[in-house]
Image (cartoon, coloured by chain):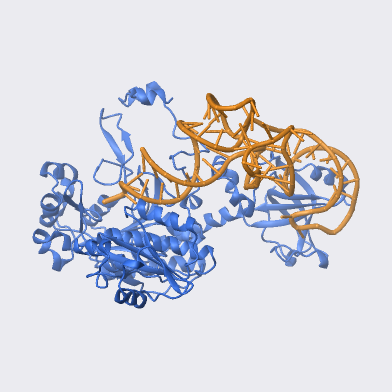
Amino acid sequence: MKRTHHCGQLTKESVGEEVHLIGWVDSIRDHGGIIFVDLRDREGLTQLVFNPEDNRALAEEASVLKPESVIGIRGTVGPRPEETINRKLVTGEIEVTAAVLEVHNVAQTPPFPIDDAKGDKVNEDLRLTYRYLDLRRPKMQRIFRNRHRAGKATRDYFDEEGFLEVETPFLFKSTPEGAREYLVPSRLNPGEFYALTQSPQQFKQMLMVAGVEKYYQLARCFRDEDLRADRQPEFTQIDLEMSFIDREEMYALIEGLIRRIWKEVLDVEVTAPFARMPYVDAMNRYGSDKPDTRFGMEMVDLGEVFAKSEFKVFASTLKAGGAIKAFNAKGLADLTQGELNHLTETARSLGAKGLAFIKAEKGEWKSPIVKFFSEDEKAALAEKLGIEEGDSVFFAADEWDRACTVMGRIRLEAAELLKKKGRLEIDPGRYDFLWVVDFPLLVLEEEAGRYVAAHHPFTAPVPEDIGLLDSDPRAVRGQHYDLVLNGVELGGGSIRVHQQALQKKLFEDVFKIPPEVAEDRFGYMLKSFGYGAPPHGGIALGFDRLVAILSGVTSIRDVIAFPKTQKGQCLMTDSPGPVTEKQLRDLHIQLTDTARERE
RNA sequence: GGGGUAGUAGCUCAGUUGGUUAGAGCGCCUGCCUGUCACGCAGGAGGUCGCGAGUUCGAGUCUCGUCUAUCCCGCCA
């Protein structure tokens, strides 16, 4: 029995037609005589009617149906009596009176409700074990559709912009300086391993040398790092690279892509160009390289106020070259001791010694540190932070980057508390896109005492800073850019180095990679630059995060059909799993004793 | 590797200071019910309180360990 309509389609226009429908039984309402069945497919619900006065045998068949069974019916579309019209359903004006019922599959009782509201509350491990049931929920079906539309918008846009989609290998070689990789043993090359690509970075640059000029790919990437709500071991990036492009052109290109996706998926007009913020400003004002600018509570630098303070903790921090940072959590003076303890714990976990605060309550400042402040200092604080009755102010005194990071994190947690108390509301339809720019090219790796690439070693320095590479490496800015949305890092990229000599200098002189190691890992790349490499640059956007935001969910597990748990397992298929001795022998692999014991 | 939260019926949860037979809603089963759409009404079944030790006359409750999920730190060029 082929269907003539889907379950979200029929309206009173179709009254009188004979139709075939097929789908899952969503619910059954058996009145002893008349029976109503809601039939569901991915498009919607349609009410079926079985009336024993018309067809007693059929009604008896229907009375033994169970929810989630798959059935097909043939029947006639009829108008519902006026008083029984269901305005909540698209198909609520009609019902289909069944004449023939075909039961494809009777379902067992599902282990959890297949229902948007109730299903959301079910333990995630159970949902993941029965993922095929979880995904039946209309909410998950909407996410599938969002993901599909976002992908299609991306492909359409880049196609129109003259880009070619090129697939690159998953099986690459190990490049240990980045994220930890998944290794794949090589049967044909005993003792050697592939690594699954963390990203197509090096291949896409080779495509530029190859003259492709404009490349993109919805690329699967693999990283063997610990998982988070926004990190899965395999994930998808919108990856692109383009020759003869500068930063300004890149911003415009990606703004066009984002506008296209938001329009196609949400029918929302995104305003471009996006705001831009230098990295240093982002850290100073928001304490993060991915600032959430949807609310204020910006940080203030108090170096000047406390430069000559009697308060030794602040004064000595400044003297040692550190910074005093603070922000005003507007209206949070009533935070409880428990909440304050929690914030303090958070600050400590980030390396702060504690969390200094002032609560402006009942006309006075309650604080363990305010007694050390002079009248001038208090006046300056009140003015700089705009302290009013009912506010809470938090302080961090530490090395500049730690002070910023700690305050940035406390700012976000304070915002969560204010949201919970109903004093801060963020419009769910608000999208604060932001380019964070002017990143340092290098960061000092304290343990090793050397510089490593802040982004990756192929990022080009800002041209006017190249001279500083030898004299003052920390001051060199990279041509790197991050795209941030509502405090989430959507992606990042850079204009790349395309000159052999500069790339070699960076590998060997700046990153101190031994020449033979550089040759082994990147030799082919350096060689290629000797044969006519165009200037080029690119970016990669986290497609899962993007779809999560478009769908209003906080975990990318919700936008991946079959995600892994925090331990990297798939509960539905029970992977990973053991393999046979023969498989191991073929791969020239022996298990250690600890690995054997776990079996 | 570290810190937090959770684990009690199929699901979501409650369970007081350690004290009789561990409860509720939904779901499930049975019966009744001809206009419901969270149908209704009546009745019923259903429990290794994650697992293992310990303290105690007595443990869902306290202690230790462990497992699983989740959030975070480290990590993610």
Q: Is residue A42 left or right of residue A292?
A: right
Q: Is residue B49 left or right of residue A511?
A: right
What colour denotes chain B?
orange
Image quadrant in which the C terminus of chain A is located: top left
What colour denotes chain A?
blue
Percent x, y of residue A377: 30, 74
Percent x, y of residue A382: 36, 76
Q: Is residue A112 left or right of residue A95?
A: left
Nearest the viewer among A224 and A293 is A293
Query: Does residue A533 lie above or below A522 as drawn?
Result: below
Nearest the viewer among A97 and A433 is A433
Q: Is residue A356 in sight in this rendering?
A: yes
Percent x, y of residue A210: 22, 54
Nearest the viewer among A334 and A44 is A334
Q: Is residue A528 left or right of residue B63?
A: left
Q: Is residue A215 in sight in this rendering?
A: no
Percent x, y of residue A149: 49, 60
The residue furthest front is A371
Query: How many numbered marks, from 0 up?
Result: 0
Q: Residue at x 14, y 68 (%)?
A: A464
Quadrant position of residue A385? bottom left
Q: Residue at x 43, y 28 (%)?
A: A578
